[in-house]
Image (spheres, helix red, strand yellow):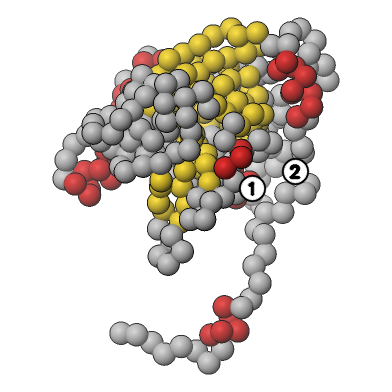
Amino acid sequence: MTLPLPPDADTRRAVAPVICYPVDSLPRPDLALYAAARAQATRTAATRVPAREARAFRVAAGQFFRITCAEGPQVGDLNLFHATDLSERFFSGKTRALHGTHVSTGDRLWSGFPHLRPMATITTDTLAWYGRDGFGCAVHDVIGTRCDPYTHHLLSGQDYHHCCHSNLTRALAAETGMAPAQAEPLVHDVLNVFMCTGFTADTGQYFMKATPARAGDHIEFFAEIDLLGVLSACPGGDCGAEHSSDRAICHPLQVEVFAPAPGALAGWHPPSPNGYDRTHGL
């Protein structure tokens, strides 16, 4: 049954929006310091993430890590954990609330409650030029949850084992020695690296289009705390058609870690956990 419009419908719709979380008081990353440190940094590790698979990597606080499209357009799904406390992990929802639906240079990836602190800061993004296109799309989203075998089965009735959720589960289990059943609940909503996405104007549905990334495009982060990262090379390839498929053309991703020279970060300290007293009014 369609209900009649209230007489003040247009007035209600015309109310101006208000930013939910003004960020003027957020501490700003010292990008100039990071850039100077990065200029003298040396590569200390590299990890190849095969197509339709995931791999884990570790980055110490004060180091940089770069994710690169190694051979061609490829979307990646990134999970981040505190290296020694896996209960502290990336909080895509709060990152989205603070920085918007897509992130780029200067934005930070935040951890969940009760820690709520920066885990990593984006320092370089070769796709920053893309901005927001005529469809409302932008790159590197914190909207999508990750492709997963449960939704795939719900929509198709088929089992598929190389969705990013499963890839991340296997890689986390392999890195930590956990059983897959233990690792799976720790896998969380991702940063969709290189993914080009938006929402439809009429129905508000999440949609994707082929990434503008090409071989050599990369995004680089400064690790604010000791990190364990897990990255999946999405089975959707460039995600221009579908994202849980053996038909899409997929490419590997490359992760590199860079360590600054001693003394290059003088005065910098890893951020402390959130200062809220956790009494919750009791």
Can residue 71 be seen in the rendering of this structure?
yes
User: In front here: 185 or 52?
Assistant: 52
Q: Earlier in the sequence, mark 2 or mark 1?
A: 2
Q: Which mark is residue 86?
A: none
**Mark 1: which secondary structure?**
helix
Relative side of 164 to 188, left or right:
left
Residue that appears at 55% across and 26% down: 218
Q: Amino acid at mark 2?
A: Leu
User: In front here: 275 or 108?
Assistant: 108
For residue 20, what is the image quadrant? bottom right
User: In front here: 82 or 97?
Assistant: 97
Residue 49, position as x, y percentages in the image = 40, 19
For residue 83, what is the image quadrant? top right
Residue 258, position as x, y percentages in the image = 62, 13
Residue that appears at 31% across and 43% down: 241
**Mark 2: which secondary structure?**
loop
Circles 2 and 1: CB distance less than 8 Å? yes
At label 1, counting other C-alpha atoms closer than 10 Å, the crowd grade (few under 14, some 14-19, many 20 or more) is: some
Q: Amino acid at mark 1?
A: Leu
Relative side of 138 to 186, left or right:
right
At label 2, counting other C-alpha atoms closer than 10 Å, the crowd grade (few under 14, some 14-19, many 20 or more) is: few
Can residue 120 be seen in the rendering of this structure?
no
Q: Which residue is mark 2?
A: 26
Locate the N terminus and report the quarter of the image it occupies: bottom left
Q: Which residue is mark 1?
A: 98
Residue that appears at 39% across and 27% down: 233
For residue 112, what is the image quadrant? top right
Residue that appears at 53% across and 32% down: 89
Residue 37, position as x, y percentages in the image = 75, 17
Residue at the right extreme?
267
